[in-house]
Image (cartoon, grey):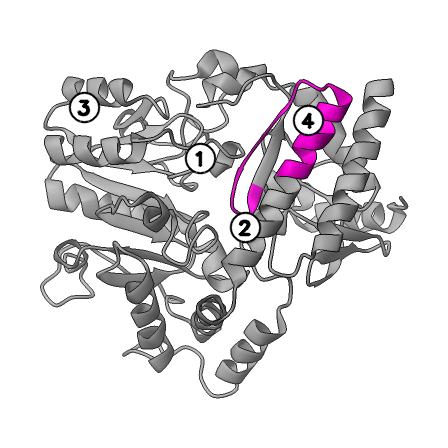
Amino acid sequence: METKRSQELYEEANLYTPGGVHTSIRNVDPHLIFTKAEGAYIYDADGNKYLDYQAAFGPYILGHNHPYVNGKVIEAIQRTDLYGVGTTDLEIELARMICRNVPSAEQVLFCNSGSEATYHAIRLSRAVTGRTRLIKFQGCYHGWHDYVARNMLSKWDMIGKRDPGSAGMMDEAIDNTLICTYNDLEDVERTFKENDGQVAALIVEPIPHNIGCILPQDGFLQGLKDLCEAYGALLIFDEVITGFRHDIGGFQKVAGVTPDLTTMGKAMANGYPIAAVAGKKEYMQRFNTYPGGDVWFAGTYNGHAVGTAAAIATIDLMEREPVHEHVFRLGERMRSGIREIHARLGMKAVVAGFGSVWTTYFMDFMPQNYTDLQHNDADFYVRYRKKLLERGIYKMPMNLKRNHVGYSHTEQDIDHTLEVIESVLKEMLAE
């Protein structure tokens, strides 16, 4: 695989940008400069072509540069854009679609990123309850702001301890965020009891996709809802990743558990920038977009025509075509195919996933939480992904990252990927 041009451009990028990237997690080895994307494929500056399962961390559920979505965006911006006052017809239509499909969405507000959405949801929960503390789970990711940027991909000796994710964070924000173990209701209940009357909200990825794909045990999500109700806290489902990817109604519809507030983004607009916070009307009307509301909500680019048009087109396609049936079927084809390869090769590995998402953990049992992932062979995991990349299969070459099947992938793509996976694993085992 030739990467000479990517290396040259990366050196230039570093002249103008610290580290040459505009999001920290993008700086991985090998550092590639991407120039083109279409359907299930991405291309770099050296002309290398990759079958893409990274999907920009999940937005591309339909595929890159999807013609229907792009067409609707072009159509929209040829007649409208951004006004800074009033409401657009696109905002109304998209809000109606979300409220129709997402169980918790009695009303919805648009913003521009998942981090914004979780920030708004947490601030709202504090206003509603008059409390300050927040419960989140070790390993889960809810954005870059001080409220939640702790105990994400912690070093193993920092699990459950005070582990802020950045310099410059405020102590008050760090210490008002309490850390629990995913899939452990006893731990959550103990935390509620120890902080009785102080917890405003519990925020959770219904499936912790920040660490691959840890599925909730039966009754766990309902148990969280019951505990929040018992202790007077709001339940926030962070469905920025799971929303629209796992069901048009989000994973809450799959699980049959309706939270008080929901955050959404990524797959709702197939790669275009938009996010949302939704929830019960009585809570949403505390935002000052509603006359008399006392929780500040603002953003110059909120509801921009590009994002709203893309989201309308994406959700419309999901309503009319078998998007989820297709990606679920191919996702299961991939997972079962990899399991068969592991069995043939006698490997110590498990394949985790749901719907269109999967990852392989190189360990001998299915993990239930972040602590369990200490047993994953991280070195093997990353080397495996780098070897796949060299053969034209793009999975993020970093430990504990998930992969995504999209509507643009075909059975032939999956079968080809499985052939490459088996070839790579055989080579690695022979080494």
In the picture of the structure, the residue carrying the numbered disc 4 is 381
Q: Look at the numbered disc 2 and give the secondary structure of its residue.
A: helix
Q: Is residue 117 visible?
A: no
Q: Nearer the viewer, residue 351 or 294?
A: 351
Q: Which numbered disc flags the more N-terminal residue, 2 or 1?
A: 1
Residue at image coords 58%, 75% = 68
Query: Is the residue 232 above or below the residue 175 in the image?
Result: below
- Real-space Cα distance between discs 3 and 2? 36 Å
- Real-space Cα distance between discs 3 and 1? 21 Å
Q: Which numbered disc flags the more N-terminal residue, 4 or 1?
A: 1
Residue at image coords 84%, 48% = 8
Q: Is residue 42 left or right of residue 258?
A: right
> Which one is closest to the eye, mark 3 or mark 2?
2
Residue at image coords 62%, 74% = 67
Residue 333: which quarter of the image? Answer: top right
Dot 3 alpha-carbon crowd within 10 angstroms: few under 14, some 14 to 19, many 20 or more? many
Report x, y in % for residue 307. Answer: 46, 68
Tell me which segment is drawn in magenta: 336-357
In the picture of the structure, the residue carrying the numbered disc 2 is 328
Residue 429 belongs to magenta span: no
Residue 34: which quarter of the image? Answer: bottom right
**Residue kind at label 2, given as amino acid type:** Phe
- Real-space Cα distance between discs 2 and 4? 24 Å
In the picture of the structure, the residue carrying the numbered disc 1 is 208
